[in-house]
Image (cartoon, grey):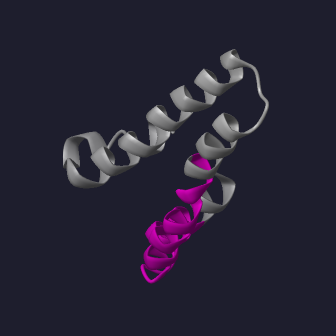
Amino acid sequence: MVVQTLLAGTAVFNNYAYWEYHRIFVIGFQLIPILMLILAFLGKLSQKIRWEVAGLFLLIVPFQYVSVHIPIIGALHPVAL
């Protein structure tokens, strides 16, 4: 979150070219919740932790795509995450 905030802030207040770095960083970062979900169900974790990871996945991934494609919800993007 610190890196994303730095990149977005730099894009807004200094150089708009940094906005592309902000977008590229998300592409790599979005794989982390997917990997966590897969590993939680493949690993020998408790049922509670597995479902907590699944809940985290459902909070992060769909909100990311909704905030990009629906402008009014996109305005909440920096506040909600």
Per the rendered image, the range of residues in magenta is 7-33
Residue 45 percent location from the top left of the image: 77, 27
Q: Nearer the viewer, residue 54 or 71?
A: 54
What residue lies at 28% left-to-right and 45% top-to-bottom? 66
Residue reaching furthest top?
48
Is 18 one of the magenta-colored residues? yes
What residue lies at 49% left-to-right and 67% top-to-bottom? 27
Determine the main secondary structure of the stretch shown in magenta.
helix
Residue 30 percent location from the top left of the image: 52, 56
Q: Nearer the viewer, residue 15 or 70?
A: 70
What residue lies at 45% left-to-right and 83% top-to-bottom? 17
Q: Nearer the viewer, residue 58 or 41?
A: 41
Residue 44 percent location from the top left of the image: 79, 31
Query: Can residue 77 be seen?
Result: no
What residue lies at 52% left-to-right and 37% top-to-bottom? 57
Residue 34 percent location from the top left of the image: 55, 49
